[in-house]
Amino acid sequence: MTTASTNDVLRAVRIGLRMSQDDLAKALRRAGEELGEPNEASKRLVQRWESGTSRAPRPVYARALEHVTGRPVEALGFTLPVPQARVHSDSSGGHDMDHSPDGVQAATATQPPPTDMNYSGIWLSRYEFFSSSRDETFEGKHYVVLLQHGARLTGQSLPGASSNPDSPLSLDLTIDRNVVTGSWIEQTAADGYYQGARYHGAIQLLVEPTGRRMAGKWVGFGKDFDVNTGPWELRLVDTSTSKATLQKYSGPPE
């Protein structure tokens, strides 16, 4: 007879893959090597997950589990520290965050956040804004290099790496558990539609369980002296910040 905390979903997925607990541990270690994130998965760790003794995998294991099973970690029966963030229009001119339809549980004060996560790397930044003068919604995209210093993240778009020419973006963020809060600044092109205007505002994002996506909202002022808001998302595309990697992403996002 199973208990309420037993992770029967993970066990069923493992059995469906025709793996023993030891086989899964070995597959996770191989996945870690392939992903460039070595881990120390063991049969004992898999046993702890399935018994419910350990109810949430660390991010490095979450990514390996996704790689091996082909399923998002939130669909593997774990009690995760944050919900899967989904941004949608609230039909009132703003945007809301929803939990995923897979029944992911919301964060609680007793659930510790990941403490070993390093968010440094190349991220694809994407936000949406409504232009009242053009009566249309537009999208801004940048490849941004994020560097982590303790609980602080600093971000800067790479040269030429924006969907709008000559539109550099900078971010100054602070990590608090699985919430990222801070400010943004974007300098528009002198010969562009906004004629070199400098925009800035606030941003708050939720970090998804694997640490590879942040989603939330921005707040900023418009040219008519009103305060606007919209969705903002950051997706990790490369954990390297080498010179060759920076050069690779120094171009407009597709």
Image: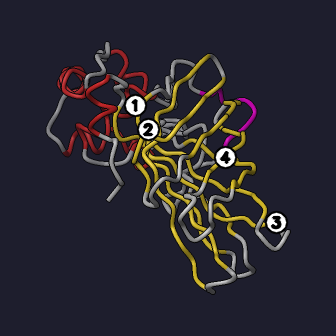
Name the quadrant of the N terminus: top left
What segment carries the magenta color?
107-113
Q: Nearer the viewer, mark 2 or mark 3?
A: 3
Residue 145 magenta-highlighted: no
3D distance between C-alphas at marks 3 and 4:
15 Å
3D distance between C-alphas at marks 2 and 3:
46 Å
Residue 163 location (% of width, % of height): 43, 59
Q: Secondary structure at mark 3?
A: strand
Q: Is residue 137 visible?
A: yes
Residue plotted at (17% across, 33% down)? 19
Instruction: Answer above or below: position of 65 versus 167.
Output: above
Image-based side of 110 in relation to 7, left or right = right
Q: Give the residue at mark 1.
A: 50
Disc 3 and disc 4 in contact, CB within 8 angstroms: no
Between disc 1 and disc 4, whose residue precedes? 1
Q: Secondary structure at mark 2?
A: loop
Q: Give the residue at mark 4.
A: 185
The amino acid pointed to by label 4 is Ile
Label 3: few (<14), some (14–19) or many (≥20) C-alpha neighbours in 10 Å: few
Residue 146 location (% of width, % of height): 51, 31
